[in-house]
Amino acid sequence: MKFSCNQQLLNKALSTVSKAITSRTTIPILKDIYLEAKEDKVLLRASDLNLSIETEIICDVESTGSVAIPSKLFIEIVRKLPNQHITLENLNGQVSLKTLTSEFNLTSHNPDDFPSFNTVESLDKRLLLDREVLKNMIRRTNFSASVDESRPNLTGILFEIEKNSLNMVSSDGFRISVSREEMQNKIEENLVINAKILSEIFKILSESTSDDDVEIVIGDKDMLVKIDNTKVFLRVMDVKYIAYKEILPKDYSTIIKVDTKDLLSAIERASLMAKEGKNNLIKCSVGEGFLTITSRSEEGSVKEEIFIDKNGESLDIGFNSKYVIDALKVIDDDEILIEFKSNLSPCAIKPMEGSEFQYLILPVRIV
Amino acid sequence: MKFSCNQQLLNKALSTVSKAITSRTTIPILKDIYLEAKEDKVLLRASDLNLSIETEIICDVESTGSVAIPSKLFIEIVRKLPNQHITLENLNGQVSLKTLTSEFNLTSHNPDDFPSFNTVESLDKRLLLDREVLKNMIRRTNFSASVDESRPNLTGILFEIEKNSLNMVSSDGFRISVSREEMQNKIEENLVINAKILSEIFKILSESTSDDDVEIVIGDKDMLVKIDNTKVFLRVMDVKYIAYKEILPKDYSTIIKVDTKDLLSAIERASLMAKEGKNNLIKCSVGEGFLTITSRSEEGSVKEEIFIDKNGESLDIGFNSKYVIDALKVIDDDEILIEFKSNLSPCAIKPMEGSEFQYLILPVRIV
C-alpha cells in the first residue's frame, strides 16, 4: 500500500474517525486506525464495537492495500506535520510517513484483525434530517441523560420517530428533556441511542462546513448516520425506555412568562450561594409580577428578583439550581413559559408557542 | 463602611489582588480580601505573607471603614453580577452587596486580623523599567526555574542589577536561561525572587492596558513593584544564587545558524517519538548544510532534516527535547546561533547579534 495526500485532509479525517476510539478498550487492535487504499481514495475507519466511524479522502494511490496503525502517535504526528503532501507506505510491518524534510517509521498491525464494518440490513427505513435540526435536538437533550450505569436505559436518548414528528427524549430520573421537530415520516420507530455516541455525532456535525442533509438508515439493532462522506455506524441500545408521555403533566395551576436570560443570570448568581450549601437548593417564590429567588448557606444569603407575567396562584417551590440552569442554557428563545401545579409536582418549561421543547424538573421539598 | 462602585472596576481589582491568595494557606484570614474605604477611594488588598498585592479603585464612599471578606465567594459573586453599580455595606459582621435586582449578604471578618502591608525601607533604591521589557524578561527565564524544593535557590530567579544592564537568570540544574537588557543603573544589586511570584507579576502586566513604566523599589529583604495603581510587595528569597557567569562557556568548536521556527517544528515532531521512549531523548547530527534530528522508541523512529549554516566541526549530540523546545518557544527572533564545544559540554543558544538572551542546555550522553 502506498499513497500520498494533503496533510490537512488527512488530519481532518483522522480527527473525525478517532471519535470512535476509547482509550479504555481492552482489545488492542481497537486502539488502531484502519486504512484502506483503493483506486483514488483512502478509507479510514475506527471502532469501539458500539460505534464505528469511517470516512474517505481523495488520495494519489500508487498501490492499493490496507493496514492498521496505532492511532495516538499517528494522529499526533499528522497534526504536527506541515501542510504539505504526505506519502504513506506500508512495508513489512512498518508504515513510513514522509514529507520533504520529515520521515517517520511506525509499527503497524495486521489489518485483517480489525473488526469489519457492520451493515445495516433494512435499508428501506430511511430518514433525511436537516443537520442544524439534528444538532439542536442533540444539544437540547443530551445534557440530561443519566450517567448512572445502574439504570442503563436512562444513559440513552430516546429517538422516537412518529408520523408527524421526530422526538428526542432524555432523563436522569430527576428531570425529563423533550425536543420535538414536526416532520412527516413514513416510518414509526422507537430507538434508544447511547448519549455519548450522540455527543460524538454532535461534534462531527459541528466540525463540518457542509449544509447537506444528514441521512439516517435504521436497521434492526443498528443505525447508520451519513454525514457528508462520513458514515457513523452505531449499535442501538437493547433497553426499554420510560413511558415519558405518561409523566408529562396535563394541567397546571400557575403559569408565568419570563425572560430567559434574566432568569438564567439570576439563578446562576443564586446558585453561587447554593453550591456551598446542600443540594444546590434555591427557593423560588412566584408572586404578583415578581419571581423572587433565594438561597442561603453558612457563608451568607442571596435574594434575586425578576419581573414575570403570572396567571394563577402564587406559590413557593424549591429546585436543584443545576437542573434549571442546564435547561435554560440550551434554550435560545428570548422568553419562555413555566407551568407549575404545586410545590411537590414537576414544573414544565415550554416555549411561548408550539412544542419544540419541554423541560420537566422535579422540585426539591422545602421546609 | 459603605460605598458604591462600578461592577467592572471592582471585578478587575479583585482579579488583580486575588493573585496573592493561595488556597493552601493555613491562616484563615489570608483567604480573605481586605477592603478599606477612604474619601473617594477603596483600597483592596490580599496577601500570602511572601507576596502582597494592593490596588485602589475610585468609588462613591458614603462612610469610611474596613472589612475582610472571604475571597472565593466574593470574587465569584462580583464576576456574575451585571455591569451596574454595586453598593457594598458592612453591618454587624455581615457585608451586603446590592444591585437593582440582587442582594447578597456575606459573612465578614475583623479587618484588624489582616496582616498589615510591609513597607520598603530603603526608598532610594529605585529602578524604572519598560513594562514590555519586564514581561519579556520574565517570559524568557521563568519556565526554567526549578520546582524542586530541595534546592530552594534554584526555585528563584536571579534579578541582577549591574551598571550597564539588568539580567534575569534561571536554572534547574540541567539548563540556564539568561535574559539581559542593556540599561544604565545607578545601583548594583543581586536579588533572588520566587519564580511563582514573578509569574503573577507577568499576569498583572498582561492584563493591564496601560503602557506606563513599572517602578521597582528595593528594600533590604523585600521589593515593591508598582504597576499603574497596583502595588506588588514581595519578600526577597534569603538564598545565594549559583555563580552562573562562571558556567557560561567561553569558546566553542562548532557554530550553526538556523531558522528558529523550522528547528522548533522539527524537534516538536521528533519529540512525539521521544516522549514514548525514555528521557525525551533526541539525537542531533550537525553536518555540512544540514542538521539531522533523530529519535526512536518501541513504536517506531523519526528523522527530521533542516538547513543550517555551519562553521567548525561536525558532531553528534543528544538532548532532552523538552529543554530545547522550552527555550525555542520563548525566542521571537527568526534566526538564532547555536554554539557547541563537544557532545559532553552544554550548547548555547544565542541571538544573531547582541546578548539579549542565552540558553545553556546540558546534553544527554548518547551511546
Image: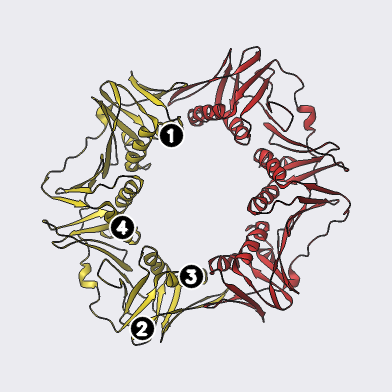
Chain colours: A red, B yellow
* Residue visible at 29% across and 41% down in the picture: B48
* Residue visible at 23% across and 68% down in the picture: B244
Task: Please tell me whether mark 1 or mark 2 is closer to you in this view.
Answer: 2
* Residue B282 in view: yes
Q: Secondary structure at mark 2?
A: strand
Q: Are marks 3 and 1 on the same chain?
A: yes
Query: Which quadrant would the C terminus of chain A be assigned to in this image?
Result: top right
Of marks 1 and 4, which one's residue comes earlier in the chain? 1
Q: Quadrant of residue A3?
A: bottom right
Residue that carries the numbered disc 4 in the rendered image: B136
Q: CA distance from mark 4 to mark 2?
A: 29 Å
Residue that carries the numbered disc 3 in the rendered image: B271
- Circle 4 chain: B
Q: Position of residue A150 (x, y in %)?
A: 70, 41
Position of A251 with respect to B320 (left or right) is right
Q: Position of residue A187 (x, y in %)?
A: 88, 43
